[in-house]
């Protein structure tokens, strides 16, 4: 994968630190001042409440905008801390300016002339007002909320500081998608797809494959078509991110997630076309069974120790609380608290039972499934027609659609079971051919 992003020592430094500091302060001051005016003069209406939202969201964006407009120093670390400093200084200054403006307008409306002494008195009174505990608390809240929401503007700041990394597919693969499990593949290698059709769609037509031509649609933009020969590789994103197709100039061509319809089929399509897969660091990802370490013949899929710790902690705490309620309370009050606490207690007890009882034991082709209540079922891998993947849950189904076993993808050795199933399915397909 082409390396575009340069480290701090190699990236060309342009811009000015002084102009960056001045731009961040002026931008934060302007955004906070407009928000305060909206808050003060329109507070009685619904529109005035937008001042709170502006003070939290608008100020961070205007601070970054000011930093870029005046040509601040092109260093992400320096730019972020400068913008934070601009927020800390700009919020109180803007609030003081808005208060002074409101007081001067009130005096002018009363027919008083604004002499230097009167203006000095207003400034002193405003300073004393801002030093009161309630005002300091309000300013502190606005500053903290602004520092929190300014993270929403880091993307625009990065686009100015380091445009190469801003457009890099490895960064785009980290951007959040549709949930914690939206981009989790079943396992590597991917399950074989058999015969891949010449035409199919991924994610309800967002990505369309027609032979060697791919068409990608994004909201608000016209469809873009390109050839599979233009694809230099695929960056595999995190579970909440995207998989990014990029060209030889390191530009994004399309993106998809594994949870969408026909995504696994598209993955096999890319593998058969010889498209390399890389991780977020640009290192190659093995996509065939020969590149992966051998899967052990015997292993057990079970809950992790976190389930044990959480189960015992909740059981001891809620059990002690329930016993105390039985001793201290009487009548309907005792019954009401017990009705609220017992379901939670049962939940933690079930976690303990899951850790001690529930498991899948794999011995070659034989699978033994033990349920929460220690009921045991045995079947062979040849009985499994498919593994249905859900949100953090997996179901092993037979040819008739009946559920043979259930497990979660965060259980210990769950990846081995998925890999063993993929391997077995590949062997069965090869034997059939």
Image (tube, helix red, strand yellow):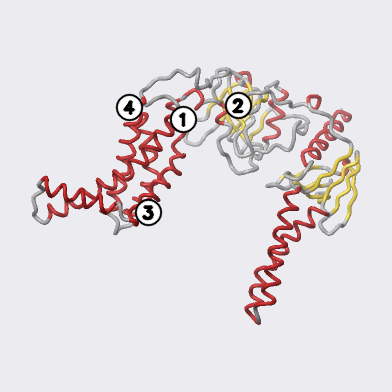
Q: Nearer the viewer's eye, disc 4 or disc 2?
A: 4
Q: Tell me the mark number nearer the camera, choosing from 2 and 1.
A: 1
Decide which of tag 3 and tag 2 comes sooner along the chain: 3
Q: Which badge, 4 or 2, comes first in the chain's sequence?
A: 4
How many residues crowd mark 2 within 10 Å: few (<14), some (14–19), many (20+)? many
Q: Are marks 2 and 1 in contact (CB under 8 Å)?
A: no
Question: Which image quarter: residue 251?
Answer: top right
Residue holding disc 1: 77
Which marked residue is nearer to the observer: mark 3 or mark 2? 3
Q: Quadrant of residue 409?
A: top right
Per the image, the residue denoted by label 3 is: 137
Query: Are the two marked residues, 3 and 4, in contact with CB atoms closer than 8 angstroms?
Result: no
- Mark 3: which secondary structure? helix
Residues at marks 1 and 4, CA–CA distance in whole angstroms = 16 Å
Judge from the rendering whether residue 23 lies leftward or rightward of residue 107; answer left or right.
right
- Numbered badge on residue 19: 4
Mark 3 or mark 4: which comes first in sequence? Answer: 4
């Amino acid at each position: 994968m082409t390396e575009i992003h340069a480290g701090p020592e190699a990236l060309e430094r342009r811009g000015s630190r002084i102009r960056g500091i001045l731009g961040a302060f002026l931008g934060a001051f302007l955004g906070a001042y407009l928000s305060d005016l909206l808050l003060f003069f329109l507070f009685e209406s619904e529109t005035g409440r937008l001042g709170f939202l502006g003070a939290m969201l608008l100020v961070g964006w205007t601070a970054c905008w000011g930093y870029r407009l005046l040509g601040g120093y092109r260093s992400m670390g320096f730019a972020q801390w400068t913008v934070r400093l601009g927020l800390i200084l700009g919020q109180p200054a803007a609030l003081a300016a808005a208060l002074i403006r409101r007081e001067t307008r009130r005096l002018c409306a009363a027919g008083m002339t604004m002499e230097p002494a009167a203006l000095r008195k207003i400034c002193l009174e405003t300073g004393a007002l801002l030093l009161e505990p309630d005002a300091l608390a309000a300013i502190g809240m606005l500053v903290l909320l602004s520092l929190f929401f300014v993270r929403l503007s880091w993307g625009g700041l990065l686009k100015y500081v380091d445009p190469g990394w801003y457009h890099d597919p490895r960064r785009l693969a980290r951007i959040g998608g549709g949930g914690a499990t939206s981009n989790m593949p079943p396992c590597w290698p991917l399950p074989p797809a058999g015969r891949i059709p010449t035409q199919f769609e991924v994610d309800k037509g967002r990505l369309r494959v027609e032979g060697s031509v791919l068409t990608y649609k994004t909201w608000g933009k016209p469809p873009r078509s390109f050839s599979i020969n233009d694809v230099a590789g695929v960056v595999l994103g995190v579970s909440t991110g995207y998989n990014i197709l990029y060209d030889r100039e390191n530009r994004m061509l399309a993106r998809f997630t594994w949870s969408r319809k026909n995504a696994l089929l598209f993955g096999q399509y890319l593998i058969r076309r010889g498209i390399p897969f890389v991780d977020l660091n640009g290192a190659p990802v093995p996509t065939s069974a020969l590149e992966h370490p051998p899967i052990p013949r015997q292993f057990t899929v079970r809950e992790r120790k976190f389930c044990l710790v959480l189960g015992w902690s909740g059981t001891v705490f809620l059990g002690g609380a329930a016993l105390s309620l039985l001793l201290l309370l009487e009548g309907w009050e005792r019954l009401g608290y017990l009705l609220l606490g017992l379901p939670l207690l049962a939940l933690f007890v079930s976690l303990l039972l899951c850790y001690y009882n529930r498991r899948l034991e794999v011995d070659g082709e034989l699978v033994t499934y033990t349920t929460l209540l220690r009921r045991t079922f045995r079947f062979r891998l040849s009985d499994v027609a498919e593994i249905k993947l859900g949100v953090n849950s997996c179901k092993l189904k037979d040819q008739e659609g009946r559920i043979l076993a259930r497990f979660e993808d965060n259980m210990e050795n769950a990846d081995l079971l998925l890999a063993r199933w993929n391997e077995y399915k590949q062997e069965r397909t090869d034997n059939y051919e």
